[in-house]
Amino acid sequence: MFATYNYLPVVLMTTLFTFGIGLGNTGMISIFIGQVALTIVVWLLRTLTFFQGGKSEFYSLVPNQRSRQYPSMWITQITFFMSCILANAATLYQKSEAPRSGSDPAIASKIYNRKSRCIMVIVMTSIFLLGMVGYRIYAENISGDGFIGWFATLIALALGGAGATLWWWASTQPNIGVQNMDIFGISQQLIQVRETDVKTMCELVPN
């Protein structure tokens, strides 16, 4: 259980890559690319003497490898991933509706359900992010390193947040190919009832 928690970033990266390629989900693939880019940035920052801190397997991205503590790879990756989910849910919540969609009670109900799901995802993800990052700060004993520890942690949080902001910006651009991404299928609630309720009958015609 601890190993899964400690190596959660690489587990997320592997899962996103596998399902993204298998399902052709550009949203998952784009988040995976963002995680790889952040890994490189954190690795470069760790080469600076100012940020190095302690060295242990606990701070490594992969098992059986010793790595520097600061900036925290774990905090950076989890902040980025959770922030991407928050940004995606907020974008879908504010998604513009079709003209007169509110006049149809069935469609209005689906829109309401989608917005409710978005709010639920935002609340649950925020709680999970605060809890996981807070516990990680405690587990790494960042306060024991004083100013350096807290400064490096703020850098990790800023990297994750900035990466998610860049990802969100890319997801809203019409020419990049990842516009209106829906990672968890919320926008499927917008399928029009009249199109899905049409009865289809197959008739066997003798040769």
Image (cartoon, rainbow, N blue to C red):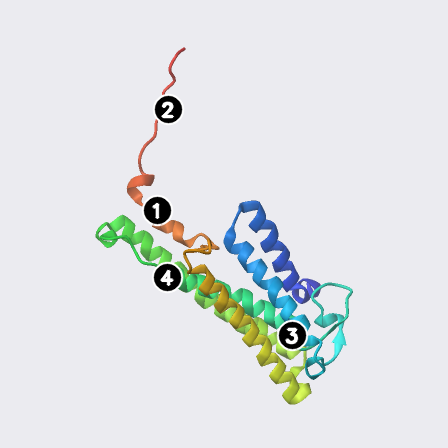
What's the mark number on residue 93? 4
Identify the secondary structure beneath mark 4: helix
Question: In this picture, is 3 found above or below 192?
Answer: below
Residue at the farthest top position: 207
Q: Which residue is mark 3?
A: 72
Residue at (33, 52) in percent of width and height: 110
Query: Between 29 and 62, which is closer to the camera in this rendering?
Result: 29
Q: Which residue is mark 1?
A: 191
Identify the secondary structure beneath mark 3: loop
Residue at (68, 67) in percent of width and height: 6
Closer to the chain start, of discs 2 and 3, is 3
Residue 12 place in picture, x, y as percent? 61, 59
User: How far, Cα to Cα, is label 2 from label 3?
Assistant: 59 Å
Determine crowd level at label 3: few under 14, some 14-19, many 20+ residues with C-alpha closer than 10 A.
many
Question: Hey, what amino acid is under mark 3?
Answer: Ser
Query: Between 65 and 201, which is closer to the camera in this rendering?
Result: 65
Identify the secondary structure beneath mark 1: loop
What's the mark number on residue 92? none
Question: Hey, what amino acid is under mark 1?
Answer: Ile
Determine crowd level at label 2: few under 14, some 14-19, many 20+ residues with C-alpha closer than 10 A.
few
User: How far, Cα to Cα, is label 2 from label 1?
Assistant: 23 Å
Q: Residue 2 appears in which quarter of the rendering?
A: bottom right
Closer to the chain start, of discs 4 and 1, is 4
